[in-house]
Image (tube, helix red, strand yellow):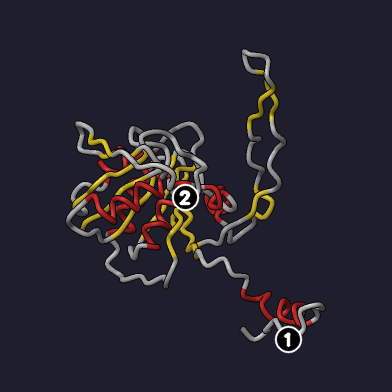
Amino acid sequence: MRILLSNDDGVHSPGLVALYEGLQGVGELEVVAPDRDHSGASNSLTLNRPLTVETHPNGFHSIDGTPTDCVHLAVNGLFDQPFDRVVSGINTHANLGDDIIYSGTVAAATEGRHLGLPAIAVSLVNDGHFHYETAARVVRMLLENRLALSLGPRSILNVNVPDVPWEELQGVRVTRLGHRECAEGAVPMTCPRGKKRYWIGAAGQGGDAGPGTDFHAVREGYVSVTPVHTDMTRHEALGTLRDWVDGLTGLEGHHDSDA
């Protein structure tokens, strides 16, 4: 099994190193990651310039682009042999609920899935202890499960691991995404040249964080495993929207609510 490892924290991230070390023997590993931190990059591709690939002494490859760039290039040209799956992480902090909209870690995994490969995004719910080895061991356990898993098209696993020693994990829970409250306000500051600048405010706390959610699972000490589907169509709203479109005036005969 050939496994592509990537992340959004950069090629020198301790979480990526821990993942690489923790998966030794599971399969043939290749690492392609951004040359710097690209947290919050989501699924962005670099289309306005060519990208540079650098190979480091430890065999890792870095790209001066986004997490999505890294997986896209790795699968579509950097290597002669194809990959069997993609693992993205270990992210330095949690990717719970609405975080996945912005997450470069999740984006690297979804890019792998768009390219036809099963993919896992893994994050550490960091509380300052940095138990990356626990998260790496969880990924290894998932990869070594002998039961076949089919999530269907455009689907990945989003995994969040409590920041505790392996022995203190309570187990694994299959969860849904929770939802955060509104983010905190932007933080103004003044740069050395006297101009006003802003830091993006901190993410909100879990507003929808009850039993069954990823927030609740990790708070109780469980690994959260969430199937994530990138089809963003709100299928339940199609009927209501068709009725609404049928009521439009000015384009009679030009719209088709059955399309």
Mark 1 or mark 2, earlier in chain:
2
Distance Cα–Cα, label 1 vs label 2: 50 Å
Between residues 248 and 149, which one lies in front from this camera angle?
248
Up-down: is 21 above or below 251?
A: above
Q: Is residue 88 left or right of residue 207?
A: left
Between residues 116 and 149, which one lies in front from this camera angle?
116
Identity, as a three-letter code, of the amino acid under mark 1: Gly
Up-down: is 255 above or below 133?
A: below
Decide: few, some or many residues near mark 1? Use Cα within 10 Å; few <14, some 14-19, many ≥20: few
Up-down: is 25 above or below 118?
A: above
Up-down: is 16 above or below 42?
A: above
Q: Quadrant of residue 7?
A: top left
Between residues 69 and 138, which one lies in front from this camera angle?
69
Identity, as a three-letter code, of the amino acid under mark 2: Asn
Mark 1 or mark 2: which is in front?
A: 1
Secondary structure of the residue carrying numbered label 1: loop
Quadrant of the rendering where the N terminus is positioned: bottom left
Coordinates of residue 63 in the picture (x, y in percent)? 33, 39
Q: Residue at x 46, y 40 (%)?
A: 163
Q: Which residue is mark 1?
A: 253
Quadrant of the rendering where the C terminus is positioned: bottom right
Q: Quadrant of residue 234?
A: bottom right
Q: Residue at x 43, y 60 (%)?
A: 157
Coordinates of residue 215 in the picture (x, y in percent)? 58, 51
Decide: few, some or many residues near mark 2? Use Cα within 10 Å; few <14, some 14-19, many ≥20: many
Q: Residue at x 64, y 54 (%)?
A: 179
Secondary structure of the residue carrying numbered label 2: strand
Coordinates of residue 162 in the picture (x, y in percent)? 47, 45
Q: Which residue is mark 2?
A: 160
Q: Is residue 65 left or right of residue 128?
A: left
Q: Is residue 27 visible?
A: yes
